[in-house]
Every structure is written in structure tokens, then in C-alpha cells.
Amino acid sequence: QVQLVESGGGLVQAGASLTLSCAASGRTFSSYAMGWFRQAPGKEREFVAAISRGGGSTYYANSVKGRFTISRDNAKNMVSLQMNSLKPGDAAVYYCAAGSFYGPAASNIGSNYDYWGQGTQVTGSL
């Protein structure tokens, strides 16, 4: 069992930067691939970024590639999402997720993730 708690959301302006964090409980954090998803009002949840168990491989949605960076610290049971050059379309509730799947092809599919956090909201003059 893994419990995930996101933090770091808030009010931002277009062009600003923000870092989201996700703290995981349990001693098996490093055995899960981690991902970030987001959901804007009236829209479906969408994939943002994912990172492999060891952190050596990362995957991004085309809409955030070059602006967002996902990272993890297995010693601290943390995964982060550094967001730069925020745009209006980035406003959403951001969710952290942990998955036991393997392979990059599965990383952008929400149903492949086993555990989800409660979300943190990013909003403002985007």
C-alpha cells in the first residue's frame, strides 16, 4: 500500500514557475514508476509526466515537454514536478500516481497506476 500526498499548488501568473511535490508513504516507493496527471474543469484527466523506478527515464506529454521536469528522490520517498513558463492551459488539479507497470508505453495511461494522491490545484492568471 502506498499513500501519496501532493503539495505545492497555488496561484500563479503566466510565465511563472512552480514546483509540485508528492510525498509517498511506505518502504516500497522505489518499486513504483511515478507519474503526474492533471485535470482541468470540464476536461478529462490527462497525462503530464512519468519517471521510471530508478529515475533514469522520464516521459512527458508533448504539451509540457521542454517546460516541465519530473524528478524523484527514492531516499526521501518524494517525486517532484518542476513547471516553468506556465501557460493558461496548465491550470488544473495535478495528481501524483504510483504504478507497478513496466515499460514507457504504459506510462501515460491512468488506469495503469495503482495509487493516486488527492491532488493539488494550480490556478491563477494563466
Image: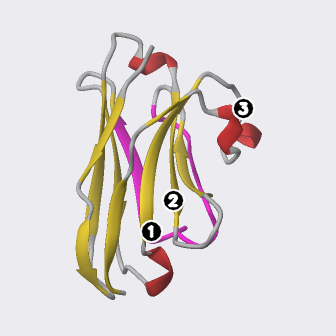
Task: Where is residue 110? Give x, y as percent.
Answer: 65, 43
Q: Earlier in the sequence, mark 1 or mark 3?
A: 1
User: What residue sits 65% from the left and 63% below the top?
Assistant: 44
**Label 2, label 1: how far apart the Cα atoms are:** 6 Å
- x, y (%) of residue 43? 62, 70
* Circle 3 Cα neighbour tier, 10 Å, few/some/many (<14 / 14–19 / ≥20): few
- Region in magenta: 55-72
* Quadrant containing the N terminus in the rendered view: top left
Mark 3 or mark 2: which comes first in sequence? 2
Badge 3 amino acid: Gly
- Tag 1 residue: 92
> Of residues 55 and 81, which is closer to you in this image?
81
Q: Secondary structure at mark 3?
A: loop
Residue sitting at 44 percent across and 71 percent down? 67
Horizontal and vertical percent position of residue 111: 70, 37
Q: Residues within 10 Å of mark 1 (few under 14, many from 20)?
A: many
What is the residue that sits farthest to the front in this orientation? Answer: 42
| Image-based side of 107 in relation to 17, left or right | right
Q: In the rendered structure, are the residues bearing label 2 and label 1 in contact, judged by CB atoms less than 8 Å apart?
A: yes
Total number of numbered discs in the rendering: 3
Three-letter code for the amino acid on which mark 2 is drawn: Arg
Q: Which residue is mark 3?
A: 103
Q: Which residue is mark 2?
A: 38
Kind of residue at badge 1: Ala
Q: Is residue 91 left or right of residue 76?
A: right
Figure quadrant of residue 8? bottom left
Left or right of 91? Residue 59 is right
Q: Position of residue 2 (x, y in %)?
A: 42, 20
Q: Nearer the viewer, mark 1 or mark 3?
A: 1
Can residue 77 be found in the magenta stretch? no
